[in-house]
Image: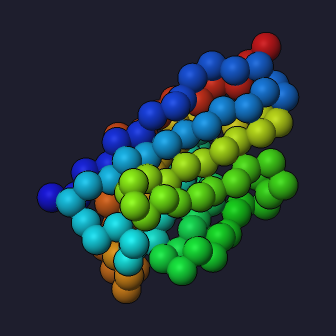
Amino acid sequence: QVQLVESGGGLVEPGESLTLSCAASGLTFNAYHLGWYRQAPGKQREMVAEITSNGSTTFADSVKDRFTISRDNAAKTVTLQMNNLKSEDTAVYYCNVQTPNRIRNFWGQGTQVTVSS
């Protein structure tokens, strides 16, 4: 079965950086679309960044020019590099994998990111 394991969350101060990683197993990794979502307390889960199977990327407006997403198909990992973090980036971040036809989604367990001084 598909398994996604996230790592890299933590507590940082505003302006600092953090890197989230997600290791996948149980799927033909290079054929899937990968993404990171987040959910802050009292808010709906939202897409943060996506990288498709052919490497195209999409970012939420709130993180453009601060976050980057990359994938390593050999290692079956997807990484979210977060720079210049702001307090409003505080949330639980979830790794997401979509089947090529975008019908099925798989989720990681989530990792907490807290940005606070």
* For residue 11, above or below residue 82: above
**Image side of residue 27 versus residue 39, left or right:** left
Q: Residue at x 43, y 64 (%)?
A: 73
Q: Residue furthest left?
A: 1
Q: Residue furthest top?
A: 117
Asked whether residue 21 is in view, the answer is yes
* For residue 35, above or below residue 30: above
Camera-nearest residue between 91 and 111: 111
Q: Quadrant location of residue 48?
A: bottom right
* For residue 51, above or below residue 85: below
Quarter of the picture holding the N terminus? bottom left
Quarter of the picture holding the C terminus? top right
Camera-nearest residue between 5 and 108: 5
Q: Residue furthest front?
A: 74
Q: Residue at x 63, y 56 (%)?
A: 69
Question: Residue 60: horizontal and vertical position, in percent?
Answer: 71, 61
Q: Residue at x 70, y 63 (%)?
A: 59
Q: Residue furthest bottom?
A: 101
Question: Residue 21: horizontal and vertical position, in percent?
Answer: 49, 43
Q: Residue at x 80, y 57 (%)?
A: 64
Asked whether residue 86 is in view, the answer is no
